[in-house]
Image (cartoon, rainbow, N blue to C red):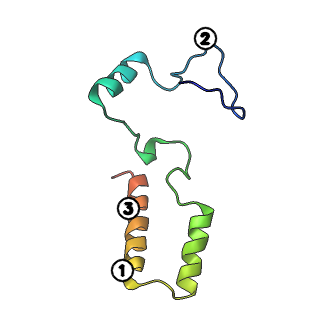
Amino acid sequence: MYVVHPNLRQPAPRAKLWRYMNLAGLVSLLMGKQLFFSKLRYLADPYEGAPTGPTLKALRKLRFQQQITREEQAAIDTWKKQTESCRAESA
């Protein structure tokens, strides 16, 4: 059942809902039951895929307070390397 949410603006009855995808792409998505994501290096926003400010602040706080295990630090380092490699041209 459809219920109008009071805090959301409703689109016009004839509004296009597929702004970023053509019909062929939509059909492919539905038939293949798969999502497609562009590589980070092809996106214009240099901060796309980067950790948020609060995440970085929390990580710095943990590191400063020495409340982080070696395994957790290794996981954080791996995460950083993977994020950087997603942006690299050779990735």
* Secondary structure of the residue carrying numbered label 3: helix
Residue denoted by label 3: 82
Q: Residue at x 27, y 28 (%)?
A: 32
Rounded to the nearest angstrom, the CA distance separating label 2 from label 3 is 42 Å
Q: Amino acid at mark 3?
A: Gln
Residue denoted by label 1: 71
Q: Which quadrant would residue 57 be assigned to in this image?
A: bottom right
- Which label is found at residue 14? 2
Q: Amino acid at mark 1?
A: Glu
* Secondary structure of the residue carrying numbered label 2: loop
Which label's residue is closer to the chain start, 2 or 3? Answer: 2
Which label's residue is closer to the chain start, 1 or 2? Answer: 2
Q: Position of residue 48 (x, y in %)?
A: 53, 50
Would residue 50 appear left or right of 85 to someone viewing this image?
right
Q: Residues within 10 Å of mark 2 (few under 14, many from 20)?
A: few
| Residue projecting furthest to the left | 32
